[in-house]
């Protein structure tokens, strides 16, 4: 009788161990699927960010080209007064925007120099990773233009 009890106990233990390993295998498979899904989403986001950055760079180039064309053409005399006022307002607005961007750029570069990743910087500044990447690429672009 004791042997029968021992056999049933060992059998129950064996079933429990087998069930445990089966559940663990299921968790690993689930973790792998989730990791693969997250990697796919991150790859898609990165591709979208690259496209967004490229579109912004194209827009920037187009804007510069339009500005050059506008500067080459003389304004009609009756519009010069209005353009001067608008130009002053635009300069004031650009200075505010530029100073805000420069402040943001300084913060991002300081964190980057501390060795933080783009994701860490984005999280700390409550901004998107794509925005941080754009800021860093803009800084690199400006640096290349200066040299």
Image (cartoon, rainbow, N blue to C red):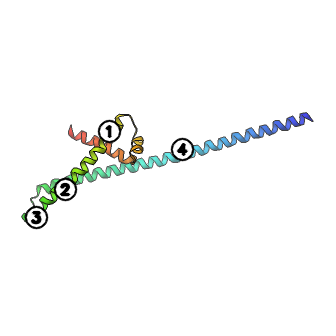
Question: Which residue was labeled with disc 4?
Answer: 35
Q: Which mark is residue 79?
A: 3
Residue at (50, 47) in percent of width and height:
38
Question: Which residue was labeled with disc 2?
Answer: 90
What is the spatial separation of the Cα atoms under label 3 and label 1, in whole angstroms?
42 Å
Mark in front: 3 vs 2:
2
Residue at (33, 49) in percent of width and height:
53
* Circle 2: element type: helix
What is the spatial separation of the Cα atoms under label 3 and label 2, in whole angstroms?
16 Å
What is the spatial separation of the Cα atoms under label 4 and label 3, in whole angstroms?
61 Å
Q: Percent x, y for residue 143?
A: 25, 39
Sequence-wise, which precedes: disc 1 or disc 4?
4
Q: Are marks 3 and 2 in contact (CB under 8 Å)?
A: no
Q: Nearer the viewer, residue 24 or 132?
A: 132
Q: Is residue 106 left or right of residue 9?
A: left
What is the spatial separation of the Cα atoms under label 1 and label 4, in whole angstroms?
31 Å
* Circle 3: element type: helix
Sequence-wise, which precedes: disc 4 or disc 2?
4
* Circle 1: element type: helix
Q: Percent x, y for residue 43?
A: 45, 46
Q: Are marks 4 and 2 in contact (CB under 8 Å)?
A: no
What is the spatial separation of the Cα atoms under label 1 and label 2, in whole angstroms?
27 Å
Q: Are marks 1 and 2 in contact (CB under 8 Å)?
A: no
Question: Which residue was labeled with disc 1?
Answer: 109
Mark in front: 1 vs 4:
1
Q: How packed is label 1: few (under 14 Cα within 10 Å), some, or many (20 or more)?
A: some
Mark in front: 4 vs 3:
3
Sequence-wise, which precedes: disc 4 or disc 3?
4
């Amino acid at each position: 009788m004791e042997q029968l009890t021992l056999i049933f106990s060992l059998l129950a233990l064996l079933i429990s161990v087998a069930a445990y390993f089966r559940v663990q295998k299921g968790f690993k498979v689930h973790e792998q699927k989730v990791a693969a899904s997250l990697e796919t989403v991150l790859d898609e986001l990165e591709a979208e960010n690259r496209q967004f950055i490229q579109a912004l760079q194209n827009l920037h180039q187009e804007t510069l080209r339009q500005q050059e064309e506008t500067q080459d053409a003389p304004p009609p005399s009756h519009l010069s007064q209005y353009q001067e006022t608008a130009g002053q307002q635009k300069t004031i607005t650009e200075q505010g925007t530029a100073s805000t961007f420069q402040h943001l750029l300084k913060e991002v570069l300081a964190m980057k120099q501390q060795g933080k990743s783009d994701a860490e910087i984005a999280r700390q500044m409550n901004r998107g990773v794509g925005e941080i990447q754009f800021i860093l690429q803009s800084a690199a672009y400006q640096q290349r233009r200066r040299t």
